[in-house]
């Protein structure tokens, strides 16, 4: 019984001490907790945005008009280029139920016209066609059921690209593989414009030389070092073709691509978590530009799309 007052006093001391510490620490801990919660929410939001972009990119790749549907690339020569299933044609189409002779692509000084044989049902832009001028890499596509034909320009050469919605590559597509999302690879960059625009002269994987206007370059810092990437103008923004120290080991050997919106006040964001492979990584019937020397970076960028593990070929 004699110890009861002492125990009560010790209990009161502990209560008072706890109350005092709470009053002291709560103003410190609460903001830290709120900041941590906000950062976690922001991180989760960012990851969800990248995952959404990746899913949309894969869906585009697998679509009826995606790169997995390309099943042939036929180079044109000056003059008449007959096409159809007959093995003696210049362009031999072995897929689908194709007539022996469909018509011809006629090329003269870089201008191309298609002529369709009488009785052959082919559409362009939804309408039956018998003859028409064809612009390369445009919406001027010839459609025959699940097949379509489009003229493609590669450097100074022209080719006809065949697409088949039922291609083997599309049916056996193995899905994409990505590095884990890492926000350290989302970097702010300074955009330095060329005045006038500079012309990049680069090679593609078909061996052709491409001359592509470049509006400027991006300067950025990654892992404490400064780097630079030459930009290419594309619809809605910029495209960067680059190679890094993961190339050929963890990522596609030739290059990867990265798209960004147009610069705002001389600034842009390079998010390498959204770097993706060129179509040549999945399909041998495509022509892909190689990175200019300035865009070959001596750093390991472990972000974005990794090497495709599925079938690459007919």
Image (spheres, rainbow, N blue to C red):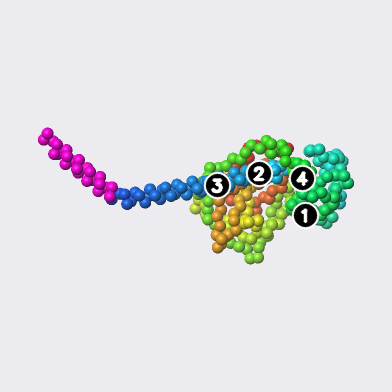
Of mark 4 and mark 2, the one earlier in the sequence is: 2
* Residue to which mark 1 is pinned: 135
The residue sitting at the bottom extreme is: 195
Which class describes the residues within 10 Å of circle 3: few (<14), some (14-19), or many (20+)? Answer: some
Cα separation, mark 1 vs mark 2, equals 24 Å
Q: Is residue 136 above or below residue 55?
A: below
Q: Which secondary structure, mark 4?
A: strand
Instruction: Examine the rendering and report whether any part of residue 226 can be seen.
Output: no
The residue closer to the viewer here, 105 or 258, is 105
Of mark 1 and mark 3, the one earlier in the sequence is: 3
12 part of magenta stretch: yes
Horizontal placement of 168 versus 58: left or right?
Answer: right
223 part of magenta stretch: no
Tell me the residue at 59%/56% (across/down).
261
* Circle on res. 61: 2
Name the image quarter holding residue 194.
bottom right
Cα separation, mark 4 vs mark 1, equals 15 Å
Circle 4 or circle 1, nearest the eye:
4
Q: Which residues are magenta?
A: 1-23
The residue sitting at the left extreme is: 2
Which class describes the residues within 10 Å of circle 2: few (<14), some (14-19), or many (20+)? Answer: some
Q: Is residue 193 above or below residue 13?
A: below
Horizontal placement of 285 versus 10: left or right?
Answer: right
């Amino acid at each position: 019984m004699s110890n009861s007052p002492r125990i009560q006093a010790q209990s009161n001391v502990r209560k008072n001490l706890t109350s005092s510490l709470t009053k002291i620490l709560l103003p410190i801990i609460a903001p830290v907790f709120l900041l941590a919660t906000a950062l976690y929410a922001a991180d989760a939001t960012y990851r969800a945005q990248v995952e959404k972009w990746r899913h949309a990119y894969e869906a585009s790749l697998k679509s009826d008009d995606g790169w997995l549907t390309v099943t042939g690339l036929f180079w044109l020569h000056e003059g008449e280029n007959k096409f159809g299933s007959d093995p003696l044609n210049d362009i031999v189409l072995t897929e689908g139920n194709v007539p022996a002779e469909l018509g011809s692509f006629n090329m003269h000084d870089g201008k191309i016209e298609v002529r369709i044989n009488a009785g052959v049902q082919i559409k362009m832009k939804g309408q039956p066609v018998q003859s028409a001028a064809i612009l390369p890499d445009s919406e001027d596509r010839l459609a025959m059921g699940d097949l379509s034909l489009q003229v493609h320009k590669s450097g100074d050469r022209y080719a006809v690209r065949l697409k088949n919605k039922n291609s083997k590559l599309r049916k056996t597509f193995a899905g994409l593989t990505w590095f884990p999302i890492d926000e350290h690879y989302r970097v702010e960059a300074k955009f330095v414009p060329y005045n006038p625009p500079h012309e990049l002269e680069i090679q593609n994987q078909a061996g052709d030389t491409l001359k592509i206007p470049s509006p400027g370059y991006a300067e950025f810092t990654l892992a404490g070092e400064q780097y630079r990437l030459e930009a290419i103008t594309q619809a809605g923004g910029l495209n960067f073709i680059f190679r890094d120290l993961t190339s050929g080991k963890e990522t596609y050997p030739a290059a990867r691509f990265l798209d960004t919106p147009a610069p705002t006040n001389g600034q842009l964001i390079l998010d390498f978590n959204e770097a993706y492979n060129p179509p040549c990584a999945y399909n041998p019937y495509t022509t892909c530009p190689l990175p200019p020397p300035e865009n070959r970076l001596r750093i390991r960028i472990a972000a974005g799309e990794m090497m495709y593990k599925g079938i690459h070929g007919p």
